[in-house]
Image (tube, rainbow, N blue to C red):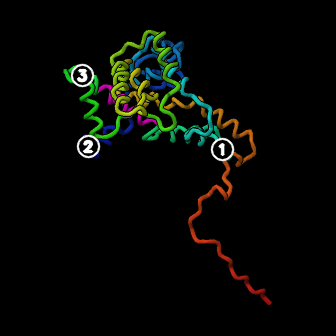
Amino acid sequence: MKGPQALLDSVDRMATRMGQAFVGSRAVFRGQDLHAELRHLDWMALYVLGITGRHHSAAQVRLLHALWVCTSYPDARIWNNRAAALAGSARSTPALGIAAALAMSEATIYGGHPYVSSIDFFLRARAHVEAGGTLGDFIEAELARGRIYGYGRPIASIDERLPWVLGIARELQLDGGPHLRIALEAEQLLVARSPKLRMNYAALMSALCADLGFSPGEMHHFQVPVFMAGMSPCFIEAAERAPGTVFPLSCEHVAYEGPALRRWPSTPAQP
């Protein structure tokens, strides 16, 4: 329904299936009492319950934890961490600095969006293969439409995070899903085209989450804090230094292409 009636139907009420706080009494989270039923739940388990509406096993929650842990780099040179470090250097607050860094994490090429595009690719690839098609044909069609996210890395073709996460998935017996198999097979097909198109973290994380039943929308929410644990250290270290000393640029580092240096005539002294 559109128009004024849609607004009138929402006046003085908010229909929700997610939950509600009955202040002074209880809080409901996805249909369960947050304190009576969910108070012992692991925070990651609560987070993905809020996103998906589903409870996950202990092994699955451990894998989800590992996906965040293994990409938490406290390196202020990384594009989003730099925002946190600069906020600390400018004596901003942790909340503002981390919020800015998280906002910068929503990058189209190397941030949050590749996870969404990658899981969408794997879900559609599986449907194509199960319908009788070949993965090779599907990849050719995708490349004809544009790029395939999750393969290739701008700095180094080898992603150092992959063997560790795959090892954890193997330990937890969560490495046998159909989307992960497609991800690994797609890497072989893409590397045959170009050695630089090796799998990166977005593909591995998206494939594992697809095997846990995540949709692209759920994946988008899940990956939001994936880099966050590395941001506060960058903020803290920058705040410990003198203000403005994080990545300062001297004039010699600026490639100026404007008008040449001009000498201004002196103003005659006033009588």
Compared to 261, does 53 lie above or below? above
Q: Earlier in the sequence, mark 1 or mark 3?
A: 1
Mark 1 Cα shell of 10 Å, populated few (<14), some (14-19), many (≥20)? some
- Going by the image, does 233 lie left or right of 48? right
Q: Position of residue 221 (x, y in %)?
A: 43, 30
Mark 3 Cα shell of 10 Å, populated few (<14), some (14-19), many (≥20)? some
In front of the other: 105 or 32: 105
Name the residue at 46% across, 29% down.
Answer: 223
Name the residue at 56% across, 31% down.
Answer: 228
Residue that numbered label 2 is attached to = 2
Q: Position of residue 193 (x, y in %)?
A: 34, 32
Instruction: Please provide the residue range marked out in magenta.
Output: 111-123
Select label 1 or label 3 by which is in front: 3
Name the residue at 71% across, 47% down.
Answer: 245
At mark 1, the secondary structure is loop
Q: Position of residue 99 (x, y in %)?
A: 55, 39
Q: Position of residue 97 (x, y in %)?
A: 60, 40
Residue that numbered label 3 is attached to = 129
On residue 23, the disc is none
Residue that numbered label 1 is attached to = 92
At mark 3, the secondary structure is helix
Q: Quadrant of the N terminus?
A: top left
In front of the other: 154 or 265: 154
Select label 1 or label 2 by which is in front: 1
